[in-house]
Image (spheres, rainbow, N blue to C red):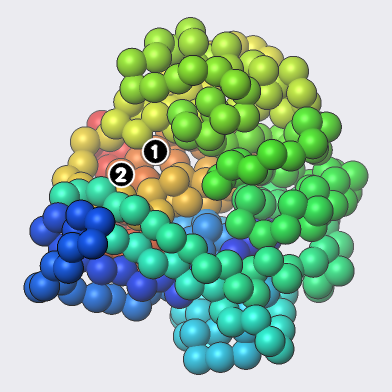
Amino acid sequence: MSRVVVCGSLNMDVVVQSACRPAPGETILGAEVSFLPGGKGLNQAIASARLGMPTAMVGAVGNDAFANSLRGFLADNDVDSTGVTEIDGPATGVALIQVAEGDNSITVASGANMHFDASMLPDEPRRDEVWVAQFETPLVATQEILARAHAAGARTVLNLAPFIEHPPEMLQAVDVAVLNEIELSQATGSRLDASSSTDEVAAACNVLRERGARAVIATLGARGAIVVTATGVESIPAFQTQVVDTTGAGDCFVGALASQLAAGRTPAEAARFASAAASCSVERLGAAPAMPTGEEVAARLAKA
């Protein structure tokens, strides 16, 4: 059976909820704090596993209490964590997340994540797998892992987030590239915003296809998503939702997408499912703990 392998970051998210964001130099009382598992890699792995797809996590943590909590959370969600390496010295990654007025701002202390290396892979990629990576671990490791997975015949998904400069030829090992409007603008030099037309977004996506990505998916928040492949452009509508916390919505989309690619769906089919999954995830607090089950996503799709 196929499986999803996620190579990426593991963080403990320190989530602070308040009625509004403090101005520079201001202190606000009455906020609530939660400690929740996160990191783009871990979030995407949990999203895939909760949808019933066998999933493995590969990454690095420190030798501390947060590492133990994250390993336990992965195990509780049936994610294979034998590829999570414990490193002496650097601390486990931490993300400080301010949630206010239905939106969030995030500061990440990467810690052990930036010490991840391709030599830490416990197994070589296999043809029947989907390998997923992001940009919260060292670029050189990500590039090598994607190249090895592509050479083995596995399908590869790269979430270009948070965006960093990278060699254009890196996309030649990518089957599906996923990024939001801001990241798409940064990756292509295009000027995109919430008012950009489908044609403008698709044109930017095609810049990445010209660099080698077989399919490019632009996530557009409340406007849904656009899937651009060799056969054309397909718009994926957003699903109605009651927003509580948008943290991890993009990661939910990527993990759900990967699960459906592993199940044999096309990029457009997988993206529609992933859009429904993301709409479920924003209705709860946190990133990884908010990832929906297959039953929840099926119910959302049935209402569309």
Residue 189's spot in the image, x, y percent? 60, 21
Name the side, left or right, on which 12 lies relative to 88.
left
Q: Badge 1: how crowded within 10 Å, few (<14), some, or many (20+)? A: many
> Which residue occupies the extreme top position in the image?
199
Q: Residue at x 52, y 51 (%)?
A: 255
Residue 150's spot in the image, x, y percent? 83, 43
Residue 225 occupies quadrant: top left
Is residue 193 depicted above or below 94 in this figure? above
Q: Which residue is mark 2?
A: 279
Residue 198's spot in the image, x, y percent? 44, 12
Labels 2 & 1 near each other (Cβ < 8 A): yes
The tag on residue 275 is: 1
Name the side, left or right, on which 267 lies relative to 175.
left
Residue 40 visible in the snapshot: yes
Q: Residue at x 62, y 90 (%)?
A: 63
Residue 199's spot in the image, x, y percent? 48, 8
Q: Exactly how many numbered labels are in the figure?
A: 2
Q: Residue at x 31, y 69 (%)?
A: 15
Instruction: Look at label 1 and name its amino acid.
Output: Ser
> Which residue occupies the extreme front position in the image?
25
